[in-house]
């Protein structure tokens, strides 16, 4: 009878060991799959962020073009105003010379 209990005990021990190994193998496979998914997800987000930092997106490009257009408009207006002011100053100088020449002739 003791031999029967010992045999039963050994069989239960072996069965428990096999079941435990199978469940641990399944758990380890699940963890490996989960790690792979996490790596893919983190990699995808990481690459997306890097690409976002490296390349402009459409909205940033549109904002940049809008600011550049505004700066060009301001610069054009500034240059036109400077040219107009220079023309007026030259006209004033010319008229002053004409007046001084007329005053010299009259005196």
Image (cartoon, rainbow, N blue to C red):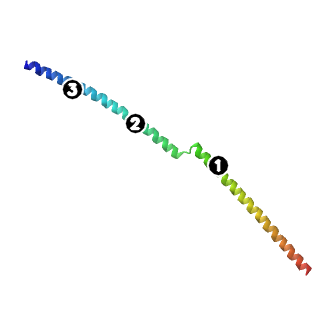
- The residue wearing badge 2 is 38
Q: Quadrant of residue 34?
A: top left
Q: Quadrant of residue 99?
A: bottom right
Viewport quadrant of the C terminus: bottom right
Residue 51 position within the rendered picture, expressed as x and y whole percent measured from the top left: 51, 43
- The residue wearing badge 3 is 17
- The residue wearing badge 1 is 66
Distance of mark 1 from mark 3, alpha carbons?
A: 71 Å
Viewport quadrant of the N terminus: top left
Circle 2 sits in a helix, a strand or a loop, which is it?
A: helix
Q: How many residues crowd around disc 1 within 10 Å: few (fewer than 14), some, or many (20 or more)?
A: few
Distance of mark 3 from mark 2, alpha carbons?
A: 31 Å
Reading the chain from its start, which is encountered first: label 1 or label 2? 2
Distance of mark 1 from mark 2, alpha carbons?
A: 40 Å
Q: Which residue does the image show at 81% across and 69% down from the upper left?
A: 92
Circle 3 sits in a helix, a strand or a loop, which is it?
A: helix
Q: Which residue does the image show at 10% across and 18% down from the upper left?
A: 4
Q: Quadrant of residue 85?
A: bottom right
């Amino acid at each position: 009878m003791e031999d029967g209990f010992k045999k039963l005990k050994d069989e239960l021990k072996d069965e428990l060991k096999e079941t435990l190994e199978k469940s641990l193998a399944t758990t380890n496979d699940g963890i490996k799959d989960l790690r792979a998914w996490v790596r893919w997800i983190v990699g995808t987000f990481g690459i997306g962020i890097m690409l976002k930092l490296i390349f402009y997106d459409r909205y940033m490009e549109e904002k940049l073009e809008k600011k550049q257009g505004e700066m060009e408009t301001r610069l054009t207006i500034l240059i036109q105003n400077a040219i107009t002011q220079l023309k007026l100053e030259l006209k004033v100088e010319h008229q002053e010379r004409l007046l001084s020449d007329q005053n010299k002739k009259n005196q």
